[in-house]
Amino acid sequence: MDRLYGALIRLAWAAVIPYQVVIALLRGRRHPLRLEERLGRPRQILPGGVWVHAVSVGEVRLALSLVARLKGSAPGLAIHLTTGTETGRTLAMTSAGASGGPDSVSAFPFDLPGPMGRLLDRLQPRLVLILETELWPNLFALCGRRGIPVALANGRISSRAYPRYLAVRPFLASALRAVRLFSMQSEEDADRARRLGAPAGRVRVTGNLKYDLPLPSLGADEARRRLALPRDLLLFVAGSTAPGEEAPILEAFTALRVERSASRLAIVPRHPEDLQRAEDALLSSGLRVQRYSRLGGEPGPPDPGYDALLVDVMGVLPEVYAAADLVFVGGSLVSRGGQNLLEPAALGKPVLFGPQTQNFRAAATSLLQAGAGFVARDGRELGRLLVRLARDPDAARLAGERGRLVVEANRGALDRTVALLQPLLDRPSRDSAAIPAIAPGAPA
């Protein structure tokens, strides 16, 4: 079965790599292919440490929290971070080489024996740590043969991905045996991992690391000053939006401005390639648009000089949330499965979202049950919710406080995850017997 997988994956990459080269050339420097890195030849890496992989921005933020904690507990530990997207790489590079940050960053190699083997040869890692649930059979098989432990952190198997994984279970089962720790978000995720072939004694439920993400260092007043916003203006933030959500967001914002003319919109597209589409939609609505990267500083009372702010800078979404009065989290009015609902909730903001929250089902349920979250099926319903909360600021503040308490009550996944990783870091790299078995269902 492993040989069949290897043959199929080689055929797949034979088709994909030329396509990626062409796309990279067409897009120019905005989307470099980074072929050397994808072939397992990154520069300036330190061997003997931990290889951490995180796909995109959300996973990289979690990875950086884990990296800081691991470095704090093991001074001098070298950490190499790989990413799967340019946006994730950009965020990772902001802390590369800094205290508590990764020592080096590169693109994730093609899942072929050659590229993966080359990077393992250079890194000689004590541990390979994968964020969320990126399952890479060639990497896992190579690590198994070399006695390198693999761990999954913040593991999640969505209801959409699970049937696809089940269909290729024979390919996955042997690779999963190389994974020494499955640190899963929920019991449902843990059960799915076991059904896919994860050894039951290596599966633990540790909770969601997103509850432990650090809050922005600046308060609401400073955050608003950076946006050139006077205190009396109501700010509606639409964060991590996806294509197709511009129209309902603008419909809702129009309804809000009928109720509160002194309202402003900040829209934060999830991906840089969506910025132009969002800006065109804002301009077509007759709004005065300002890009975050061109903000001039202090507000000119009583007007910041824009009706809608387009956030075109990476990594500032938490600060924009800190300035908000009302928040909508995108990817939830279209079939993307939603984005992180916990970031605004942790800041005490009432959180609005669409019905498509499969990627954050537990968080959505918790916020709804606490009266901290609000579901809108379309732009009209989103507008009604915004108006209702704008009319009753006390209710909005109460909803925000309830959301903050939900986040506080669920913290602790970071501590539990690091505690489980420590034995894997302390053991001799080839002493697989030194890894203690974990009884299924044992308390975290």
Image (cartoon, grey):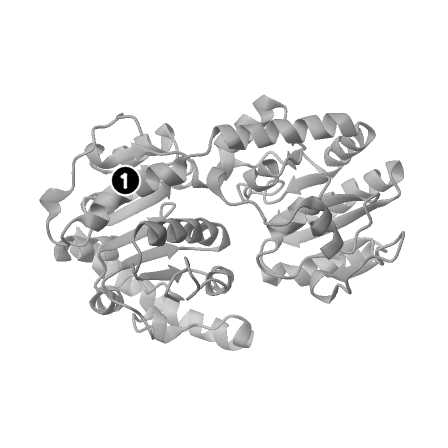
Dot 1: element: helix
Residue 260 point in image, percent of width and height: 87, 39
Residue picked out by circle 1 = 420
Identify the residue shown where x is 83% and y is 38%. Answer: 255
Is residue 112 visible in this depiction of the protein?
yes
Q: Is residue 232 left or right of residue 345?
A: right
The foreground one among 339 and 246 is: 339
Is residue 242 visible in this depiction of the protein?
no
Q: Quadrant of the C terminus?
A: top left
Q: What crowding class fits label 1: few (fewer than 14 Cα within 10 Å), some (14-19), or many (20 or more)?
A: some
Q: Is residue 18 left or right of residue 269?
A: left
Residue 424 point in image, percent of width and height: 21, 47
Residue 104 point in image, percent of width and height: 37, 67
The foreground one among 252 and 130 is: 130
The foreground one among 183 and 377 is: 183
Identify the residue shown where x is 85% and y is 58%. Answer: 305
Residue 364 point in image, percent of width and height: 55, 31
Tell me which amino acid carries mark 1: Leu
